[in-house]
Image: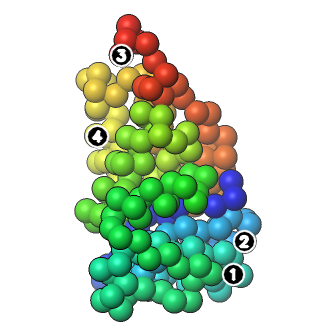
Amino acid sequence: MKRLAVYCGSASPEDPRYIQLAYDVGKTLATRGIGTVYGGGRLGLMGAVAKGALDAGGEVIGVIPEALAKSEVANHDCTELYTVSGMHERKQRFTDLSDGFVTLPGGVGTMDELWEAMSWAQLGYHSDPVGLLNVFGFYDELIAFNQKMADVGFVREVHSGILVHATTISDLIDKMAKYEPHTPIFRMKADDL
């Protein structure tokens, strides 16, 4: 994996562990020779991921919507910074520039990015691993809900392994590197659906 898109919040929670986690993720990616593609902001977890990667000498590519860039939250310290028209173009650029997706704790925007990456993988728009870093138990319920969707039958068995999760970034990267692409819906026959 040459580059990974990192999805995370632009907020700075009161608990300092989240900012430290984001910094450590950026640093770990850089020390493992993996470039970081992220939302292009300088605030919150986003800014910490970029700083960690840059401090470790890594490549950092930011992709920020024009409206956010104009509100002065863009991180101009990035190796490259792309300004795009909106969120749809941003997510497409993440997919085009990356070999996989890592989701850190975050809010609604982070969830939007995670679910779209999973949906696109299921359909066949990409065949890259979708990773979830479940630190501090933050995503316990989401992992259980994803399993419930599979148990009930809303996620086909062949797609139940799309979401790769671990509690440390090193373990998550290792699992993602071993990810075997599944058969996407676009290549399935009607009887398989």
Q: Which mark is residue 193?
A: 3
**Label 1 belongs to which residue?**
56
Label 1 secondary element: loop
Q: Position of residue 72 (x, y in %)?
A: 35, 92
Quarter location, residue 143: top left
- Which is nearer the eye, 177 or 140? 177
Q: Residue at x 55, y 39 (%)?
A: 127
Q: Which mark is residue 31?
A: 2
Q: Position of residue 89 (x, y in %)?
A: 39, 61
- Name the amino acid, label 3: Leu
- Name the amino acid, label 2: Thr
Residue 97 in view (yes/no): yes
Q: Residue at x 37, y 40 (%)?
A: 119
- Image quadrant holding the N terminus, namely bottom right
Label 4 secondary element: helix
- Which is nearer the eye, 36 or 87? 87
Label 2 secondary element: helix
Q: Is residue 175 left or right of residue 18?
A: right
Q: Position of residue 7 (x, y in %)?
A: 43, 63
Tag 1–tag 2 contact (CB < 8 Å): yes
- Image quadrant holding the C terminus, namely top left
* Sequence-first tag of 2 and 3: 2
- Identity of the residue furthest to the top in this view: 191
Tag 4–tag 3 contact (CB < 8 Å): no
- Name the amino acid, label 1: Ala
Quarter location, residue 78: bottom right
Residue 164 in view (yes/no): no
- Give neighbour class at mark 2: few <14, some 14-19, many 20+ (Cα, 10 Å): some
Q: Which mark is residue 145?
A: 4
Measured in 3D between alpha carbons, the distance from the residue under mark 4 to the one under mark 3, in whole angstroms, is 21 Å
Measured in 3D between alpha carbons, the distance from the residue under mark 1 to the one under mark 3, in whole angstroms, is 46 Å
